[in-house]
Amino acid sequence: MSFTFNDLKKHCEHNWRDYLQHDFVCKLGDGTLAPDAFRHYLKQDYLFLIQFGRAFALAAYKSPTLSDLRHAKAGLDAIIDLELGLHIDYCNQWGISEQELAALPEARATLAYTRYVLDTGNRGDLLDLHVALAPCLVGYAEIASWLTKQPATVRGDANPYEAWIAMYESAEFQAAARAEIAWLNERLAEVPASRFKQLCRIFDDATRLEIDFWDMGLELRM
Ligand SMILES: Cc1ncc(CO)c(N)n1
């Protein structure tokens, strides 16, 4: 039996769909999301991305080969240079300054998700860590592709969230997600069923924590 990334998704099909097609996502797509919910999400996502940068740094630390190290570095670059850079500009456009960002407390959903990933990476091996990171990188890439295909999605200036969709639809972000899937597929092909079961648990946990992150945004929860 040889496993793939697709098998991970199939094992948590229900939660994966709830994450991808969450109300928050649908409202981003048709432009009806409350601006305050979006601002709350943006602020927390800034804090989230900093912790995710640390998680990719942990992946670099745990990399036994140059090829694994390069892969972790590419993930770190995608978060720090591409996403966080755009994110700070984007927050400015939404009236959130860098000083405000630097002084923010983390919401419980942010704490739970990011520390779960860091803890999973600390106690497990590199594969555990990358499986915990996958819903983030691959999920957002799939969300952008899914939104693009929905008839209800409004594109261009008519949607205040156009830039958000465009960022995750970008060739760079999509390529980072594809590289993550390719890396995972290579490793998953070699794991026995008992190990795959453990990895499914991690993938499902991280996916549920992504759902909580959307809920936190919609409900302005701290
Ligand atoms: C919560 C969350 N998940 C995934 C991504 C994509 O990197 C993000 N920016 N924020």
Image (cartoon, rainbow, N blue to C red):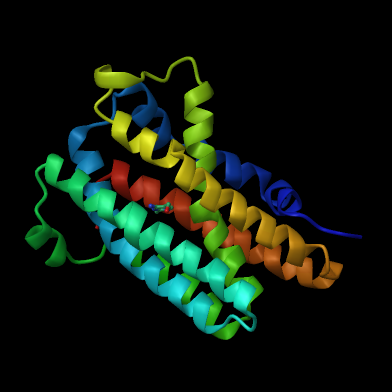
Q: Residue at x 38, y 26 (%)?
A: 29
The image shows residue 58, relative to residue 38, as above or below, that is below
User: Between residues 128 and 24, which one lies in front from this camera angle?
Assistant: 128
Q: Where residue 101 appears, x then y in whole percent?
A: 15, 60
User: Between residues 204 and 179, which one lies in front from this camera angle?
Assistant: 179
Q: Residue at x 48, y 40 (%)?
A: 171
When asked about the image quadrant of residue 164, the answer is top left
The image shows residue 159, relative to residue 44, as above or below, that is above
The image shows residue 167, relative to residue 26, as above or below, that is below
Q: Where residue 55 appears, x then y in whole percent?
A: 45, 72
**30 left or right of 60 in image:** left
Quarter containing the C terminus: bottom left
Q: Residue at x 41, y 20 (%)?
A: 153
When asked about the image quadrant of residue 49, the answer is bottom left
Residue furthest to the right in view is: 1
Residue 94 in view, yes or no:
no
Q: Residue at x 36, y 69 (%)?
A: 51
